[in-house]
Image (cartoon, grey):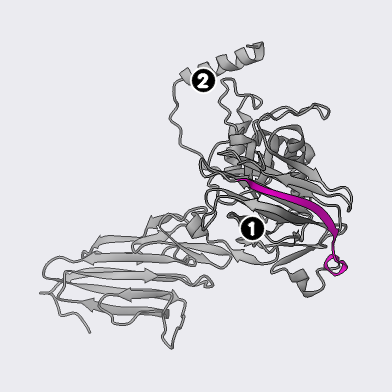
Amino acid sequence: MTMRELISFTLLLLLRNMPMVNCSPVPTTALEDCLLQTSSSLDGIDPVGTVQSWPKNLVPFDVSNRLIGKQRELLFRALDFWEARTCVSFFPHSEQSEFVKFEAGERSCSFLGKIGGIQTVYISGNDTEVFTAVGRLIGRTDTPPTDQPVICPDSCGGNFNIIRSSHVGYLHSPNYPESYPSNTECIWKLTAQDFHVVSIDFQRFNIEDEEDCLYDFLELFFLDSQRNIIRKVKWCGEEVPDADLESGGTHVILRFHSDDSNNRIGFNLSYYEVEQPLQERQQNCDINNGGCDHWCIPHVHVTKSVLCACREGFNLAADGHTCQDIDECALKVDSCQQRCRNTNGSYQCFCRTGYSLDADQKTCNECGGRLTASATTRSIYSPGFPGPYPYHQNCKWLIEVEENHYLNITVVYMDIAVTSSDGKRCQKDFLKLEHVKRKLCGYYTQLNYVVEGQRSTYVRFRTEDISTNNSGFEITYTQARTSDEEPGR
C-alpha cells in the first residue's frame, strides 16, 4: 500500500468513527448532489477499492436532446478517446434497465464507476472537464498515454473506419462457422467517410429464433454523422436479412447478444461504403424547416446538413426529425407529491380535496380543515388572499355549529375567474357552498346566507385555470341560537 493510499484509508476510518451530527438536510438538485459527493472523494481515488465496473466493459447510454452543439461534439470525442485507450465500449441503450444518461449541465460531473439504475452524467465546459467526467464514469481518474498499447483479453468486437470506397471488410459472430459461445456480448462500430454511408451484405445468418428476439439477437443502430440514431433493427432466426442493406448513415453499431442455451452458427457479413446521394446532402433549414418538428440546426461538411432538436419536455424520435412528448408522470420526473397530469411538453401537479398546491408547484399543503362556529365572527380566506390565488387548488372547509344553533355565512368579497364550458359558467375556478345549489364565480360583495336545521356545512374552493390574476375570496361565519330573533331571509 502506498503512503497516499494509507493516508486515505486512515482518513476513511476516522470519518466512519466520528459521531453523527443531527442536521436538517439541505435540498439539492441532482447536479449539486453529484458535485457535492464527487468533491469529497479524495481526488476521486477510492481507498478501499469499492468502485463498481461495468459488466463486460460495455456501457449502454442515451443522450439528452438538450445536449447539442459543441457540448455534444465534445461528448462523442470523449467517448472515442476512452474507447481507444481502454477496453470499454459505449453503445446506445435499448432494453437495459441500467444505463447512462448524458445530460446538459452547468458543470461537468460524474460519479466514479457504475452506481446502478439510470446514471446521469452532466456535460459542460471544456475538453478536459468533459473527458474527465467520462473517465470517472468508467472508473478512471488518470489520463492514459496515447502510445500505451491496449490489450483486451476475452473480448469481441472493435471499431473499424472505412478509409476508401473500394475497401470491403468482413465481420462474423464469435467461433463462426462453429456455434457461437453462450453469454456473449459483442459491439462492433463501422464508420464511413464524410458524404458516404455504410452498406452491409449478409452472406449467412442463423441465430436462435424467438418471436421478439429476446434470447439471442443481432441488433443494428444506424447513426448519422452527428451520432443521432436514424433507425435501429433487431434480428434473429434463420432468414438472411436483406442483402446490400444501406444504412443511410455514417455510423453503424452492431451488437451481438447470446444467452446460456440454444447456440447456432451465428452470422457472416461484409461491409463497405457508398457515396451519399447529392440531394440528401443538400437538405437545409430553409426548406420545410429541414423536416424537423421543432428546431432545425444547420451543419456543414457532414453526411446530412441539418440536425433536429426538440424543446424541453420532448424526445427526438428514432427518425431524427419527429419530437415526441415525454410523459413525466409515468417516469416520475421531479415527482408530484400527490397527483400528476401529463401535458404536451410538460406536466402539472395537483392535489386531493383538502390540500393546496404549494408555490413549488409540486408539494401539497393542507388547505381547509374542520372549523367550529361560535358567537364570535371568524373568517376563511382563499390561499394567497388578498393577492392572486394559485392554480390547481382543491380546498374544503367543514363548519360545525352547536345544537339548537343556526349559521350565518357572509361572502364579504369574491373575485374568481369566470370560465365557461358547454354553455355553463364556473366550470374551472369556483366557490361552492353546500346549501347553495349553484357554483359561484365572478365578482360579488356581501352575499348573505343562513344555514338552518343542520349541524354542519362545507365550503369548497377549487381552481384549475392558470391564466387568471384574480384575488379569491373572504368569507365570515358566526352562529346564533335558534331561540333568538329569527334570522333574515
Q: Image point 76% across, 65% down: which residue?
A: 296
- Give the magenta range: 265-281
* Horizontal side of residue 153 vs 287, given as left or right: left
Q: Nearer the viewer, residue 210 or 422?
A: 210
**Is 273 inside the magenta-drawn segment?**
yes
Q: Image point 27% across, 73% down: which residue?
A: 409
**Label located before the other in sequence (1 or 2):** 2
* Horizontal side of residue 374 vs 70, given as left or right: left
Q: Amino acid at mark 1?
A: Val
Is disc 2 placed on a helix, strand or loop? helix
For disc 1, the neighbor class at 10 Å (few under 14, some 14 to 19, many from 20) is few
Q: Position of residue 105 (x, y in %)?
A: 67, 47
Q: Nearer the viewer, residue 443 or 376?
A: 443
Q: Amino acid at mark 2?
A: Leu
Answer above or below: position of 195 versus 43: below
Residue under label 1 = 233
